[in-house]
Image (tube, grey):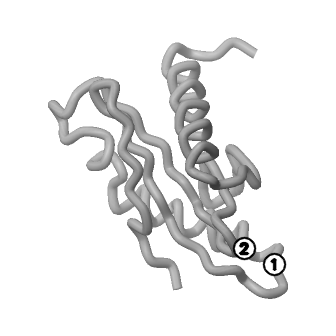
């Protein structure tokens, strides 16, 4: 399948984020979980809990940067996708949403940026 330059860049950013999170002790559960509600870039395990990770990369902060690109509409899709993903669990584990923001070559890990329950 032919990928656009943006898709290739997005995949590389996810690889960078995944390597960083694994170095911090998190374990990969699933990547690119896709459902009708949306997509979750990375689903990681941090101790007993699940972490839904959105990876955002921007070349500059000119238009608000990576973090500001997680709009309220995007947040809503992330929450719905996570709720859909959690349907597979009989007992829902502790969960949180994190964002990996990559700007100007710098990676920032923001923990627990959204509440779902």
Q: Give the left or right position of residue 54, taking residue 48 as reference.
A: left
Q: Give the left or right position of residue 111, taking residue 10 as reference.
A: left
* Residue at (44, 46) in percent of width and height: 100
SS at circle 1: loop
Q: Which mark is residue 89?
A: 1
Q: Give the left or right position of residue 49, taking residue 74 as reference.
A: right
Q: Is residue 82 above or below residue 32?
A: below
* Residue at (42, 62) in percent of width and height: 111
Residue 106: quarter of image: top left
Please name the residue that numbered disc 2 is placed on: 86
x then y, percent, for residue 41: 60, 46
Asked if the residue at tag 2 contacts the one at tag 1, i.e. Cβ–Cβ closer than 8 Å, the answer is yes
| Quadrant location of the N terminus in the rendered image | top right
- Alpha-carbon distance for marks 1 and 2? 6 Å
x then y, percent, for residue 77: 51, 61
* Residue at (77, 76) in percent of width and height: 87
x then y, percent, for residue 39: 61, 51
């Amino acid at each position: 399948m032919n990928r656009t330059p943006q898709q290739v860049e997005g995949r590389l950013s996810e690889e960078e984020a995944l390597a960083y999170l694994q170095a911090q002790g998190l374990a990969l559960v699933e990547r690119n979980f896709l459902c009708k509600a949306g997509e979750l870039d990375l689903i990681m395990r941090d101790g007993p809990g699940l972490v839904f990770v959105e990876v955002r990369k921007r070349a500059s902060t000119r238009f608000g940067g990576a973090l500001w690109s997680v709009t309220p509409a995007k947040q809503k899709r992330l929450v719905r996708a996570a709720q859909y993903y959690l349907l597979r669990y009989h007992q829902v584990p502790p969960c949180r949403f994190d964002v990996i923001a990559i700007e100007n070559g710098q990676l920032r890990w923001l923990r627990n940026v959204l509440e779902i329950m």
